[in-house]
Image: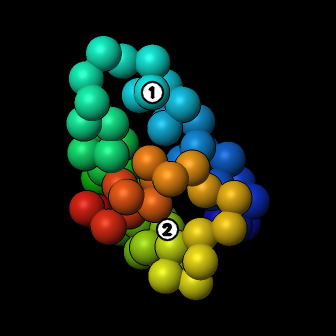
């Protein structure tokens, strides 16, 4: 998947969970990514974060470290 598409998808997930009342958004984003993204996509996200995570919501950066 292109990095741009991955960033867009991950940020959309973070945006959704920001609207929820709980403060554990990174854990909830990580859970969603673990449940619905295939292992290669999760690995790509973790690698992207390790390379700086340009354009990712900070919640996604935290979530990637939990996947």
13 lies above or below 61: above
Please rate how many residues cluster around mark 1, counting C-alpha atoms within 10 Å: few if below 14, some from 14 to 19, many from 20. some
Disc number placed over residue 45 in the picture, else none: 2
| Quadrant where the image shows the N terminus | bottom right
The residues tagged by marks 2 and 1 sit, at their Cα atoms, a distance apart of 19 Å
Image quadrant assignment for residue 39:
bottom left
10 lies above or below 44: above
Circles 2, 1 touching at the beta carbon (< 8 Å)? no
Q: Earlier in the sequence, mark 2 or mark 1?
A: 1
- Colouring mode (rainbow / by chain / secondary structure / one colour): rainbow
Q: Nearer the viewer, residue 15 or 5?
A: 15
Disc number placed over residue 18 in the picture, else none: 1
Tag count: 2
Q: Nearer the viewer, residue 65 or 1?
A: 65
Identify the residue shown where x is 58% and y is 43%: 11
Give the image location of residue 29, x and y in percent.
36, 42
């Amino acid at each position: 998947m292109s990095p741009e598409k991955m960033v867009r998808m991950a940020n959309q997930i973070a945006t959704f969970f920001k609207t929820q009342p709980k403060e554990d958004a990174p854990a909830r984003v990580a859970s969603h990514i673990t449940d619905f993204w295939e292992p290669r996509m999760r690995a790509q996200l973790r690698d992207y974060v390790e390379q700086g995570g340009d354009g990712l919501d900070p919640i996604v950066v935290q979530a990637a470290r939990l996947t």
